[in-house]
Amino acid sequence: MRVYALLLRLYPASFRHEYGVDMAEIFARRRRDAVGPAARGVLWIRTLIDVVTNAAIVHADIVGQDLRYTARTLRRSPGFAVTAVLVVALGIGATTAAFSVTDFALIRPLPFPEASRLVKLWERTPGYSRMELSPANYRDWKQAATSFSSMGTYASTSMNLVGAGDPQRLEASWVSADLFPTLGVAPLLGRSFAEADDRAGAAGTVVLSYHLWQSTFGGDPDVAGRHIVLGDTPYTVLGVMPATFNFPASTVAGSTVDLWTPFRFDEQAYQDRNNNYIVAVARLRPGVSVAQARAEIQVIANQLKQQYPKENRDTDSTVIELQSDVSRQSRLLLEALAGAAFCVLLIACANLANLLLARALGRRKELAVRTAMGAGRERLARQLVTESVLLAGVGGAIGVGVASAAVPLLTRLVPTNLPTVGAPSVDLRVLVFAAVLTALTGIAFGMMPVWRMGREAHLEGLREGARAGGGRKERLRSALVVAEIVASIVLLIASGLLLRAMWRLQATDPGFRVDHVLTMRTSLALPKYESTTRRAAFYEQVLADIRALPGVANAAYTSFTPIVMGGGIWPVSVNGQPEMRSEEHTASLRFVTPGFFDTLGIPLREGRNVSESDTADRPFVAVVSESFVKRFLSDERAIGRHFTFGLSDRTVVGVVANIRVRGLELPSEPQVYLPYKQVADGNIIGYVPKDLLIHSSLDAGALMPSIRAVIRRADPQMPISNVRTMGEIVDGQTASRSVQLRVLGAFAMVAFLLAAVGIHGVLSFAVSQRAQEIGVRIALGAQRSDILSMVVGRGALLAAAGVVPGVALAYVAGRMMEALLVGVRPGDVATFASVVGLAIVMTLAGCLMPTLRALRVDPITAIRTE
Amino acid sequence: MYPHWLYSARVTDKPTAPDALLPLPPATFHILVAVADEDRHGYAIIQDIEARTGGELRLSAGTLYRSIQRMLEQGLLTEPRERPARADDDERRRYYRITPFGEAVARAEARRLSQLVKMARARGLRPEKA
């Protein structure tokens, strides 16, 4: 019988109380009738089925009843229903949108098998925590390390595909044969690289991306074995990678890697330990932790320091999980967004709880009557929870809709270096997240009034003229409002700080002309353009023709457009000091054509520009930035000084102003500009000038057709890509910030409004509950000013209780995102002062209506209701 | 900020027509039939149904009380205050009585069932003799 009593607990308590005894009795009779173990067994099985199915039906019945009841009551108070639903929709919508982006970028595992075991290996030198490896160091690390089951390497490049329609510039990647096996991804079609394809002298082979296979090769199922021409070298297609494979992430925002080809390192490649351009990816052996691998690689790096004291003196190592290979910047942006969304959710929940509490208070009588008529506490609790879950459910559904609409606007916040395909969207994971959040919101905040109700004497509600639900309830509601104020202050200050940071960034002078400059890339394919003379002929023809175009002021070629490519860092050695690779001993290297400084409006401070007469047979010269003079030449007279840089000794012939080659936020290394002719054939080939800059009053649309014609004339096989204005490039620096700021700002405004509404709600309620008291006071001779200060005083108290911790928390939040603030102090006085000012306005606005109402209390009517 | 119209509500149940509840679940119909002539308690209802159906239908306790609960809410049954004056009256037991609405519903269901049988017969589908 005890078992049966336990089984009965599956029924709702109300049902059990009503019929439990009778059911137990019937069961007892049945048990008496069942003789023998077989009959008993059958009885138990039947009983079990009976209890489970019927309990489920009874529960469903009650839910149905409650839903119908809720729908009816809500229809009668649409204002409450709409407010509650909107509040929930806002909270869930914001959080869901933020989650879908954060999940996509930071949380979900990368699309590789056992992705958590994949790590990236970098060299580390003073000032550079993640620097590419030199092939020689890579080879030594790989040979010595035991922590990994496999290791591969890659480097990004670009190649020109000719002979298949228009010449096409492709995002390509050099890979070692063991890269794909290390990642654990097999080709969709054909085969990937074998060791033999990756040896010096092996025939050219490529694996295509799914995208390129579809777009250029029409999805040809027999593509494996086909011959293609890249630059002017023949390659054989080996296979096609799956559509979801995008590794390494393209260095060009918005594009994906098109094809892969083996490194085929020769002995020459292993000579220079300071030629860092490859990235290593490794798979940890089972049971080996990242920390162990990190320790082992550092030991190896230390051995190499002793073995190669000249080149490796400053070379340490970094090992990080592939998953966390997202810049600190992007991570912070996303974390700030997620934190803000969570704040909005909390505020929304606090508001929902306040709404429900107020409603429960207003329905006290109804609930007490129902209790008196025999509805158990459990039934009432279920009713209230059903109501809040229904509200939360509808709100959550709308919130998910809001999130689906908002997510595409947030993709700007996704770091571009993710090895994934596609964009964040509201998918199953996100839906589950939203559903759990909604259910929690509904249940937790539905339970709050129930829990309150349980503490009150049941019959209190029936007493006529009962005053407010006691000080406790009011304190809880006040606490919720204070929490709303805290959260809104934190959000407002965070947004304010980020706004100041963005203004500061946007006001930053990059040091070069931003308006009326058009940029594009014409990648000069190797080995066709390996010789310096051949390149010079191309530049001369193209630049002369472009300068002759109407509306063009000047044009020039450079290795890399500033900001687009911030790297290209080489060690500087002055007076025969050994080369060091720490931050204080490096400068950025750019080969430029004459006209570069004029095109970008970089002022020449001293000496002369690079010129056409700076040829390979003349003394090697360099134009350096002022920061270079300050750092390396002790700020003394620079012209005529010598230094070793980029494999040769160079003489300073000119000094120009600094530019922000690393972008608006990061500190830039000093700049060195070398004449494009002063480089040996095939040397520093990655630095071949290929980015074309044009200073023109015409816009890109008007200019491009004639530029295309000019380049086609010079080389019909030369593809043109990355056409962008300098303005777009510089704006791109703050694009993700401005998206984040707009989102945060919207969150902050919503939070601010909700908090104001919260203050208004608590005060209104207090005034209406205390109308009698106010009436009595007025009757006893209290002045209007006393009433005024009573109401406003409470409002001010609420605001102060929220502002003080809010300001403190905001300072903490500011400290946490200091890296995003580009020098704006986390305790920025102007920001804090304006937000506190806003909080005062908010409090006054929230107090306005309740105060007016309190002042209008008519003592006679107020007292008479007693 | 939450004026009265935001949260006040009053709810009443609308009366239902007997036909609106048709077709009745078999258990409901049997229970109505069982209490048609006299008030019975739960176990007596089960026994009555079992006897009338020749042991074919033996309601489980769960099905019985779940149905009873729903029927009380629908107004098909009531729990009478006065107890039947009989020797076997058990103080603890709860008795159920059919309401006029319950009778109307039972009649409507019986009519529906007999019409179904009539229709079947008209097409030559006669029940086989047991």
Image (spheres, coloured by chain):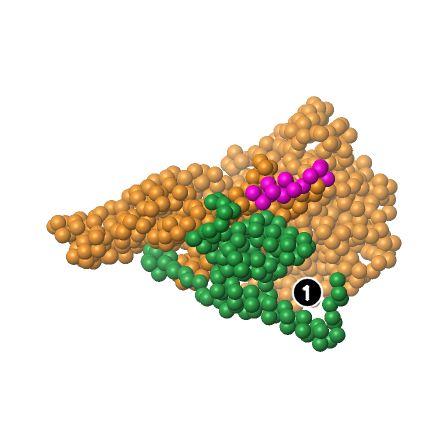
Q: Which residue extends farthest left?
A: A781
Which chain appears orange?
A: A
Magenta stretch in the rendered image: A25-38
- The residue carrying pointer 1 sits among few (fewer than 14), some (14 to 19) or many (20 or more) residues within 10 Å by Cα, namely some
Position of A658 relative to A1 (above/below): below
**SS under mark 1:** helix
Which residue is drawn at the image coordinates 78% and 64% (left, top)? Answer: A165
Residue A609 screen position, x and y as percent: 58, 49
Where in the figure is residue A191, as x and y percent of width and height? 84, 48
Residue B4 visible: yes
For the point 67% across and 30% down, which residue is it?
A289
Quarter of the image with the N terminus of chain A is: top right
The residue shown at (45%, 65%) is: B14
Q: Which one is nearer the viewer's eye here, A71 or B129?
A: B129
- Chain bearing tag 1 is A
The type of residue carrying mark 1 is Arg
Task: Judge whether residue A35 is colored magenta.
Answer: yes
Which residue is denoted by mark 1 in the rendering? A708
Work out whether A669 lies above or below A560: above
Examine the structure image and report whether residue A708 is included in the region drawn in magenta. no
Q: Which residue is located at x 73 percent, y 49 percent? A: A245
Location of residue A235 in the rendering, given as x and y in whole percent from the top left corner:
84, 52
Q: Which of B88 and A633 is in front in this view?
A: B88
Magenta highlight: main SS: helix
Q: Residue A118: horizontal and vertical position, in percent? A: 70, 38
